[in-house]
Amino acid sequence: MTAPLTTIEKRIRLSGLLLIAGLLVELITLRWSHPTSFLFFLLLGGLLMALGIVVYLLTLVSAENKSSAR
Amino acid sequence: MEGTATILIAVILFSIVLIAWLVLRPSVTATRGGKILAFVALLVFPVLAGGLGVNEQIQHSKTTRFCLSCHVMEDYGKSLRVDDRSFVPAIHFQNNLVPRDKACFTCHTDYTMFGDYNAKLRGLKHVYAYYLGKPSQPIKLYTPYNNRECLHCHLGARSFEESEAHTKDPQVMAKMKVNEVGCTTSGCHSITHNVGQLKEFSIWKEPTE
């Protein structure tokens, strides 16, 4: 039986999933030659990747806060 | 461009593999090595992939294929292949006076410090007009065509500097250089895309190898 995930691990997983989705959008739009692909890349891919990075950075900050509190 | 695209694809795929491993085993981030791995996989590589991606998309958006992929641009693409020497864009395209794979961008970017960025911003406006607004029919330039874009290549060229039409009146050359006499509006090179007249002309077929 696997141990339940900690909050940090859950956030890492969420961040990773968002980033994978963003990277996949980037990969697909690279092979598609149309102005719409640029919008998808910028708005959808960019948003997903930015969210993924923000979630990861928040995880770092919250982990730092917890260790300082201890 | 193909080389950077390959590097970008490699970076994206490598990032996905690293991140997938972290998603499957997030507990590795409890160790020092895992923390470094998470930093690289969740921050460094995505930022790198994003930056390379923006650059690649911008390079991509300069291609003729990209510009002509919108339905409203089809006739403008056709005008590059008109079999008539009086069509300025056609003569440039067919004789490799502009790179064929970047024909639209070569003539329709501003050769100024932020010309590329202005062109991209205008491109975003076009996408907005295409999907949410209504493209003007026929399509018009935002500002009259500036001689600067022609002179970027022609200035200093013997065919331009010594042309009888350009040198007959010494004032003309000086006025052209400061955009007071427009190359395309003075009646000398006024046949540009003229999409309304395309049906009257035959279309040049590019020989295939």
Image (cartoon, coloured by chain):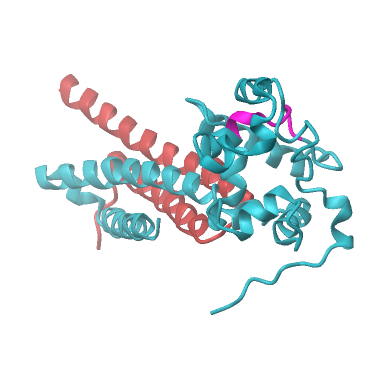
Viewer-nearest residue: B39 or B148: B148
Q: Which chain is cyan?
A: B
Q: Position of residue A68 (x, y in %)?
A: 16, 21
Which residue is at 34% across, 45% downward? B46
Q: Is residue B165 visible?
A: yes
Q: Is residue A1 above or below residue B144?
A: below
Residue B142 part of the magenta segment: yes
Which residue is pictured at 17% across the width and 42% down the height?
Answer: B35
Q: Main secondary structure of the magenta part?
A: loop
x, y percent for residue B122: 64, 33
Above or below, comparing residue B168 to residue A24 in the picture: above
- Does A54 appear above or below B192? above
Quadrant of the image for the N terminus of chain B?
bottom left
Please tell me in which quadrant of the rendered image residue B159 appears. Answer: top right
Outermost left residue = B32
Q: Is residue B19 left or right of residue B67?
A: left
Q: Position of residue B12 (x, y in %)?
A: 35, 55
Q: Position of residue B55 (x, y in %)?
A: 42, 43
Q: Does A64 lie within the magenta span?
A: no
Look at the image and tell me whether residue A6 can be seen. Answer: no
Nearer to me, B22 or B130: B130
Q: Is residue B196 left or right of residue B107?
A: right
Which residue appears at 48% of the width and 56% of the height?
Answer: A30
Instruction: Using the rendered view, name the quadrant where residue B170 is placed.
Output: top right
For the record, the magenta segment spans B141-149
Residue found at x 37% / y 41%: B51
Which chain is represented by red in the image? Answer: A
Within the image, what quadrant is residue A53 found in? top left
